[in-house]
Amino acid sequence: MFDVLIAGAGPAGLTMANLLGQAGVRVLLIERDPGLSEIPKALLIDDEFFRLLATLGLSAPVSAHGVYPISFDYYSPMGWRVGHVEPSITEHHYSRRTATFQPEFEAILLAGGERFPTFEARFRHELVDFEQDADGVVATLATPEGEARVRARYLIGADGSHSLVRKKLGIPFDEVRKFGDRHIVVDVLEDPDTSPVAVTKLGWSRNYVSLPSPNGGRRYEVSLHEHETDDAALLEDAALARMLAPICDDIRTRRVIRKAIYTFHSRIARRLSAGRVHLVGDAAHVMPIFGSQGMNSGARDVKNLGWKLAEVVHGRALPSLLDSYHEERFEHLVETIKIATANGKLQSARMLPVTMARDLFLGAASLIPAFSRWIRDMRYIPKPYLKSGIVLHDGRPDPKSLVGRVLPNPAVVSDGGAEMLLDDLLGPGFALVGLDVAEAPAGALRHPFLDPARISRVALRPEGAPAPRAAEGVVTAALADHRLSEAIAFHAGKWLLVRPDRIVAAALAPADLAAGAGHLSRLLAGEASPEPASVAA
Ligand SMILES: Cc1cc2nc3c(=O)[nH]c(=O)nc-3n(C[C@H](O)[C@H](O)[C@H](O)COP(=O)(O)OP(=O)(O)OC[C@H]3O[C@@H](n4cnc5c(N)ncnc54)[C@H](O)[C@@H]3O)c2cc1C
């Protein structure tokens, strides 16, 4: 019996396989096709996904084939620039935008999974049915050798937007916003345009996009009108060349590797889990490409669910922990879908007064530094924030508090003098991070949940501050950049309990540390509510 059966070897299923493989979970990944997809869809990996890839030990191969930096310029139909997005390095330490070639990216993920002895992949294996009982899931697979049955404790539906898993569970795929824009997408290799800048021309009638991609390639896109439904005619060479002329002088002279028409919807599965079955990636949600959050949201699903599955499979948490997956992800997904759709609607506005108002507003607002930074840094894309779930809030949400948010990933210098990223110091599991603490509370550190075999323990201090009194099993280090400075000022003297997905579960004064650790371990065991009675954040 496998611990986890993953249906679908797209980016979501492959990333989940890596995360579970790294955690020593026995995983079977099945894919109905003979190999990985040869069709490039997602182009842009965001900073959070890249950080996850780094913790999976995959940042080097992805960097080697990816394109970075990429900035984005948006032009109005009148030709003036109405928006600019920078490829800035974020609090996660990676760029918001790294371009990838999905087939190569998926191959890197598959090779990543194959590093782990508990991982197995089977192609030409299609999930056709499944049943669940008290102990697990029995899946029926169509294979080249005929029908086969596989038993696993959990099933992950990573089988894309037409998910059989979601349909078999009878989970509705609700429309979050009405959207149905269609785009032609053309991928080209060795394009003469080698600019690292992505350009979007918002037209009176259509929008045009030109984006750099790996291998000296480029992606060209053009939006379609509702009445343009003859896909074969639209993709015919001469028609395509005419259509793309405002963004590409003659597409017929390019080495086109793929042309396709996509319809973008805004949908979410009403439940992300049902019993022992969980949905991730496009099986759980689809959204328009504006903001490039489709695959990246799937990576967040994996990050949220993966560590919980590992904890449960290894017997360190009760299965009820998995209920928090829906609770923690659903709202953020809906927000992300709404923003992606609003962005799409804004870009595809066609009525003259609306486009004029949009472009005049954006043009004028971009002169305001705060607004232009908001656009440049893509701050309109919602960051994950857990109001409930496996987090200990003290009832006073504060925008400066890290509780419920992702811990930044600053550069640090260990007391041995080695410079590294905080993530590398913490490793992949739970972490206890002291922020500018005077000393480590030896009594609290004896709590079983804080056992160094289970949790890495680090005391961080601002650059130049004196090192805290050393305690056994606590590594001390100094910050080497500003990514945690604000949080250190806000949480000074506190200990952060950090989950394996780098969400800060609690910020605790030394006197509350043992109680907070106890509360968190009871939450993992499904024995407590997230409202701690006596823990101050
Ligand atoms: C043109 C375009 C551009 C995009 N750009 C971006 C971008 O820049 N950034 C971004 O974040 N997102 C982007 N997206 C979205 C992104 O491509 C998807 O969100 C992502 O591919 C979803 O990954 P997935 O693994 O969930 O599903 P998929 O990639 O659809 O993979 C599902 C896999 O499951 C397999 N499968 C299906 N049914 C079964 C079954 N019954 N048994 C076994 N296997 C099965 C399929 O063969 C497939 O391999 C873009 C999408 C498009 C169309």
Image: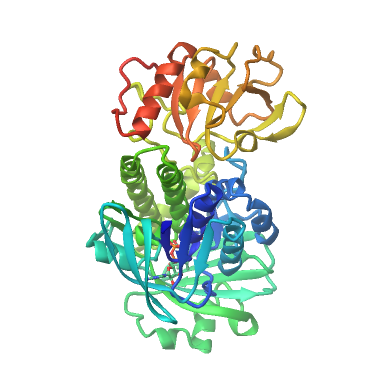
Residue 338 rendering spot, x and y as whole percentages: 34, 51
Q: Is residue 287 left or right of residue 211?
A: left
**Front-most of residues 404 and 263:** 404
Picture residue at 56% right of the left edge, 31% below the top: 453
Which residue is the extreme one toward the front? 1
**Front-most of residues 292 and 16:** 16
**Front-most of residues 272 and 246:** 272
Quarter of image, ligand 1:
bottom left
Residue 480 visible in this rendered orientation of the protein: yes
Quarter of the image with the N terminus is bottom left
Quarter of the image with the C terminus is top left
Residue 470 rendering spot, x and y as whole percentages: 66, 15
**Front-most of residues 166 and 409:** 166
Q: Is residue 207 left or right of residue 318?
A: right
Picture residue at 42% right of the left edge, 61% below the top: 6
Eyeballing the image, is 146 above or below 531? Answer: below
Quarter of image, res 177: bottom left
Quarter of image, res 318: top left
Eyeballing the image, is 476 above or below 61? Answer: above
Residue 475 rendering spot, x and y as whole percentages: 65, 24
Residue 180 visible in this rendered orientation of the protein: no
Residue 51 rendering spot, x and y as whole percentages: 58, 46
Quarter of image, res 409: top right
Q: Is residue 132 left or right of residue 183?
A: left
Instruction: Tally the marks.
Output: 0
